[in-house]
Amino acid sequence: MFKKIIVIFTFIFFILSLLNTLEIGKITLPDEITIQSDTLLLNGAGIRKKLIFKVYVGALYLKQKNEDANVILEADEPMVVRMHFTYKGVSPEKLINAWNEGFANANTPEELQPKIDEFNSYFTEKALKNDVYDIIYEPGIGTSVYIKDELKGTIEGLDFKKAVFAIWLGENTALPKLKKAMLGLK
C-alpha cells in the first residue's frame, strides 16, 4: 500500500512539474523567470526559422500577459526576450545582419545608431546549439544583453528598448509567425 501511495504522489508531482514549463522544438521553457525582484510570466514562444532551418526558440516574458504588441513596445516595465538556439551555429556576422535588418524594419530613428553599434558589438562569438541569449529590459537601467548567463553590456533608454523589442514585435517585423507566437496568439 505504501508503495502505491509513493507512486501516485510521484506521478502527481511529475504532472504538476510539467504544468510549470512549455516545450517548443524540444526546448523546455520555464513559465516564469525572475529579474531582480520582478517575476515575469511566459507570454508566448515560437520558433525562428530561416528557410528550412530552425534557428532558435524565442520566448517573451512580461510582468503580466498581453497580446497587444504596441502596448508591450511602449511599456516601461521589465521584460525579456529569450533566444534558445537550436541550430548548430550562427556566426556573429549573421546575427548582426539580422539585428540590422530588424532595426531597419522597425524604422529605428537615426539618432539611435550609436546605441545600435554598441548593441552589435556584444555579438562576437558564434551562437551554438543550446546557447541561451537574453535581451532584458529593466526600467531605469536599460536593455542588457546576456549571452550564456554572462552580461555583455547594458544600453540605457526606453527608446532603445522599443527599437530592440520591435525586432520581434514591431509592425514591420520580418518575423510575423514568431511575433504571433510570442504574443500568445497561436
Image: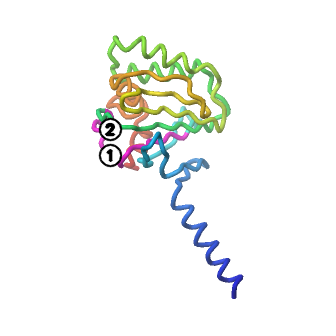
Quarter-of-image position of residue 156: top left
Q: Establish if 110 lies above or below 87.
A: above
Q: Residue at x 54, y 48 (%)?
A: 29
> Dots 1 and 2: beta carbons under 8 Å?
no
The residue sitting at 41% across, 50% down in the picture is 186
Quarter of the image for residue 9 reads bottom right
**Which range of residues does the magenta coloring cover?**
57-73
Q: Which mark is residue 72?
A: 2
Tell whether 166 sits left or right of 48: left
What secondary structure is marked by label 2? helix
Amino acid type at circle 2 is Ile
Pick the quarter of the image with the N terminus: bottom right
Expressed as whole percent of the image width and height from the top left, the position of residue 47 reads: 52, 41
Residue 16 lies in the magenta-colored region: no
Q: Where is residue 58 in the image (x, y as percent from the top left)?
A: 50, 39
Numbered disc 1: secondary structure: loop
Closer to the chain start, of discs 1 and 2, is 1
In front here: 22 or 77? 77
Q: Which amino acid does label 1 sit on?
A: Glu
Q: Point out the residue furthest to the front here.
A: 37
Q: Distance between the residues labelled 1 and 2?
A: 8 Å
Q: Mark 1 points at which residue?
A: 67
Q: Nearer the viewer, residue 12 or 96?
A: 12
Residue 71 painted magenta = yes
Residue 24, how many percent across, how many down?
Answer: 55, 49
Q: Nearer the viewer, mark 1 or mark 2?
A: 2
Tell me if 102 is positioned left or right of 171 in this view. Answer: right
**Disc 1 residue crowd, few under 14, some 14–19, many 20+, Cα 10 Å:** some
Residue 59 or residue 102, whichever sits in front: 59
Write the residue at 56% across / 61% down.
Answer: 18
Q: Is residue 105 left or right of residue 118?
A: left
